Image: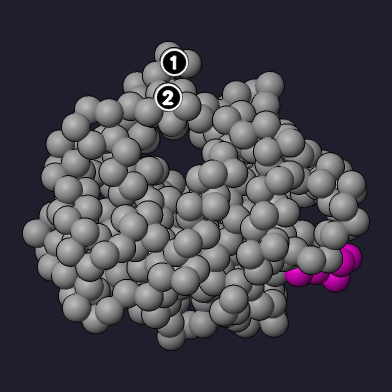
Amino acid sequence: MKKNKLGRSGIEVTEVCLGTMTFGSQTDAETAHAQIERAGAAGIDFMDAAEMYPVNPVKAETIGHTEAIIGDWFEKSGRRNDWVLATKVSGAGLGAVRDGAPISPATMTEALEASLRRLKTDVIDLYQLHWPNRGSYAFRQQWSFAPWEQDSAATRQHMSDVLGWAAREVERGTIRAMGLSNESAWGTMAFNRIAEAEGLPRMDAVQNEYSLLYRMADTDLAEVLLHEEVGFLPYSPLGAGLLSGKYQDGAMPKGSRMEVNVADGGAGDLGGRKTDRAFEAVAAYLQIARDFGHDPVHMAFAWSARRPFVTSSIFGATTLDQLDHALGAIETELSQDCLDALDAAWRAHPFPY
């Protein structure tokens, strides 16, 4: 499988990354371990987690279960060194973790030590800030995102503090590289300007939502990623499952993310992605898949993984069958005519959620 450089970290990762956010909720430990083994057998060596996982929904009583399941597999298999391991520290707004405390050197130390214990490892290869303290336009928050309310001096001091903490942990050997998630072009640049000015570790990756339905990264962020050599790790390349077509015409498959969320009392709106315009856009992409003889899941994954500024596209699966299906994207090649058709569909259906 093709490997790409992760920023300037010296780490190389496969162009596909195994996402684990359902491990411990929709995916039980036995199936999760089988998924890790199946992905490894397919040539994947990159796995992404977070201290807050599993999701759908996030619950105080399940915080950390995903990391614990991964750690149990490392201990049982003895194959920790076969994987590049990424995880994340949560911050302000998630009351289930540290009562919603913002990210700081103190909370990062607490979070890192807990993740190391659960993952049963001595080192995290990529340690990421799950979202910025100052706020983010991710998760359908672009309508209320207000950069003019940010405290510039406090934000820059926070960035310096985080990078100083990272320098100490790199020296201690507990992390190899740092990364961001749900971050903007300015935030990425600001972190790395401070890193350069102060001789501190830089941010070598950004993990943001990116799919045929959500191409926010195509403009300013892509320019930063390419010219500043920062790796990009798209999540939700299937638009929370919409691009598979399984939710078209009012369908709600049993065991799907939408059905589980509704059964648990949630809105079942796929984090705000379920809109009439989204279903219209999906119909256009499904037609393109038919026109070019592609499975829609393979087409969406392959498009995401092969974008010029993408380092590794993250996909997750609830079941082994879903994982096996998704792995077909590794061998999928999209012609220029297909790529042109996908671009035309994006122009016709921009930002459907």
Q: Position of residue 344 (x, y in %)?
A: 13, 68
Q: Position of residue 252 (x, y in %)?
A: 33, 27
Q: State the residue at coordinates (17%, 48%).
A: 283
Q: Residues within 10 Å of mark 2 (few under 14, many from 20)?
A: few
Per the image, label 1 sits on a secondary structure element best described as: helix
Residue at the far front in the pictured view: 293
Per the image, label 2 sits on a secondary structure element best described as: loop
Q: Residues within 10 Å of mark 1 (few under 14, many from 20)?
A: few
The one of 88 and 143 positioned closer to us in this rendering: 88
Q: Reading the chain from its start, which is encountered first: label 2 or label 1? A: 2
Q: State the residue at coordinates (37%, 54%).
A: 297
Tell whether 57 sits left or right of 113: left
CB under 8 Å between callouts 2 and 1? no
Report whether residue 166 is seen.
no
Report whether residue 112 is seen.
yes
Q: Position of residue 351 (x, y in %)?
A: 20, 52
- Residue with the mark numbered 2: 254
Range of the magenta residues? 170-176
Count of numbered circles on the image: 2
Height in image: 120 above or below 230?
A: above
Mark pair 2, 1: CA separation? 10 Å
Tell whether 352 sits left or right of 115: left
Height in image: 286 above or below 303?
A: above
Task: Check residue 203 for magenta coloring.
Answer: no
The one of 307 and 225 positioned closer to us in this rendering: 307
Indicate the amino acid at tag 1.
Ala
Q: Which mark is residue 119?
A: none
- Residue with the mark numbered 1: 263
Q: Position of residue 144 (x, y in %)?
A: 28, 41
Indicate the amino acid at tag 2.
Lys
Height in image: 117 above or below 339?
A: above
Q: Nearer the viewer, mark 2 or mark 1?
A: 2
